[in-house]
Image (cartoon, rainbow, N blue to C red):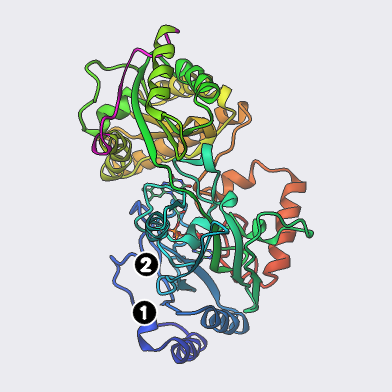
Amino acid sequence: MGSRREQQLLAEIGAIVGATGVVVDADPGSRYRRDWSGDNTGLPMAVVRPRSTAEVARIVGLCAEAGIRVVPQGGHTGLVAGALPSPEGDELVVSLEWMNRIVAVDENNFSMVVEAGCVLETVRAEAAARGFVFPLALGSQGSCQIGGAIATNAGGLNVLRYGMMRDLVLGLEVVLPDGRVWSGQKALRKDNTGYDLKQLVLGSEGTLGIVTAATLKLFPAPTQVETAFLALDSADAVVRLYGHARRDLSDLLSAFELLTDTGVVHSGLANPLAQAAPCYVLLEISTSGLIDARALLEAFLASAAERGLVRDGAIATSSAQAASFWQIREMIIEKQRRQGRHLRTDISMPISAIAPFMREAEAAMAALSPDAIVLAYGHVGDGNLHFNVVPPAALDEAGKIDLLARSEERIFSILDGFGGSISAEHGVGRIKRHAFLDRISPVHRDLIGAIKHAFDPAGIMNPGRILEQTAP
Ligand SMILES: Cc1cc2nc3c(=O)[nH]c(=O)nc-3n(C[C@H](O)[C@H](O)[C@H](O)COP(=O)(O)OP(=O)(O)OC[C@H]3O[C@@H](n4cnc5c(N)ncnc54)[C@H](O)[C@@H]3O)c2cc1C
């Protein structure tokens, strides 16, 4: 444990949260010290677990007085090392894990008030139990928290229908870096009274304050969900099929995922179709009305086959079969992780650029490292691709790091040519800070610097994430 100043601070915080609320010297293998990928590690000065907004405010106020840096931590599933403390042991982690209550549900307003530490899966289950859906759906939903999803403006599988977290939040409560509380806990769908502070906090990755509670939008739970696994000839065909699906499926499309054959093979799971194809689409429609979703989907697929867009396909006949289709997509992600260090990207581009981008980026990777495995999959309706690279197993760790750095640079530079974004989902954090700052104009830099300064003039809240760290 560090300086006298730090020891005194922890004693004062201990008096607020109690002995079990402060964790010092966490085990090196603990989740507070490693991120989900296992590629990055950190060392918290200590981990503090408050139980209420008032406690968070008092802790942050003490840190502000002492000039101690603070890192908000949610479910720790973020992929850009934003919630990971620095390796120097000079950042205090404030974990929201004990602030996990569902506070209230207003069924007539289609809204739910939750504490920030609620796990996304819990929120979804509570909504489902009352006949609603909270539509944010991510591979990490069993661990990630609402506060983390707000801080990263998380997206996921159903964005094309319901939007990102930014579209799903009606109100927020935030502890500011000086310990004051901003209560923007409104439950309004329309509110045009000046600057929208909550939208500044959404996606700010914990750099502007600690989210302690939120009011979320709910939607009617779909009573019919139909899922299809389709084989197509190319990424061009996938984008064309998407255009038809948007027009012909009566706005019921809730997911439209691109997979490649390399990805399906990589998942290690059986291909649901008899013959392999270059690309696949996982398509889902859902509704809660008087419409016959199954008949609509069958008619759509028959017409897509007639147009020569779809080679083959299967519509799930049970929810278990639908889950097995989705399992293929999830296993692509899980298998990458098990293979160790790899390049994860979460890029976006205009939907019309997906196929030409993939052609150019695949050719570039073949030239750079013919033995690397390219795993491209993504949310077509959001123009969002995960264009990931698994390095050849024969390369040593230094060789892998070098290849992945060069691959990322090449992929990002091709993306620049299509007017894309280097992060559609995971955010900037510490890992993508340089790539982000190198791509924005001086005007953009000035504006985001001024916003950070307005919220956090002392620079203690999640320093070095998104923007460069400033003194102290
Ligand atoms: C398997 C897997 C699948 C994923 N799929 C998707 C996906 O489909 N779409 C997508 O968008 N993302 C996805 N993600 C990444 C995504 O960013 C996180 O899963 C989630 O949004 C982060 O929530 P968390 O609670 O784990 O936050 P953490 O990882 O704990 O934190 C993330 C950032 O938010 C800050 N933060 C956390 N809590 C708070 C708070 N209460 N107040 C202020 N700041 C806070 C942290 O400081 C950090 O900068 C995936 C991750 C994994 C591991």
Residue 59: x %, y % from top left: 53, 82
Label 1 packing within 10 angstroms: few (<14), some (14-19), many (20+): some
Residue 182 to residue 366: above or below: below
Residue 32: mark:
2
Task: Name the kind of residue labelled 1 in the image.
Answer: Val
Residue at disc 2, secondary structure: loop
Residue 346 to residue 238: above or below: below
Residue 98 to residue 292: above or below: below
Task: Using the numbered discs, state the Cα–Cα distance from disc 2 to disc 1 in whole angstroms.
Answer: 10 Å
Q: Is residue 82 at least partly visible in the picture?
A: no
Left or right of 279? Residue 198 is right
Quadrant of res 436 = top right
Determine if the magenta segment contains residue 227: no
Label 2–label 1 contact, CB within 8 A = yes
Magenta residues span 307-321
Which residue is nearer to you in this view: 326 or 227?
227
Residue 322: x %, y % from top left: 29, 35
Q: Is residue 11 at least partly visible in the picture?
A: yes
Quadrant of res 259 = top left
Quadrant assignment for the N terminus: bottom left
Q: Is mark 1 within 8 Å of ligand 1?
A: no
Residue 23: mark:
1
Residue at disc 1, secondary structure: strand
Left or right of 276? Residue 16 is right
Determine if the magenta segment contains residue 312: yes
Residue 36: x %, y % from top left: 35, 54
Residue 85 to residue 180: above or below: above
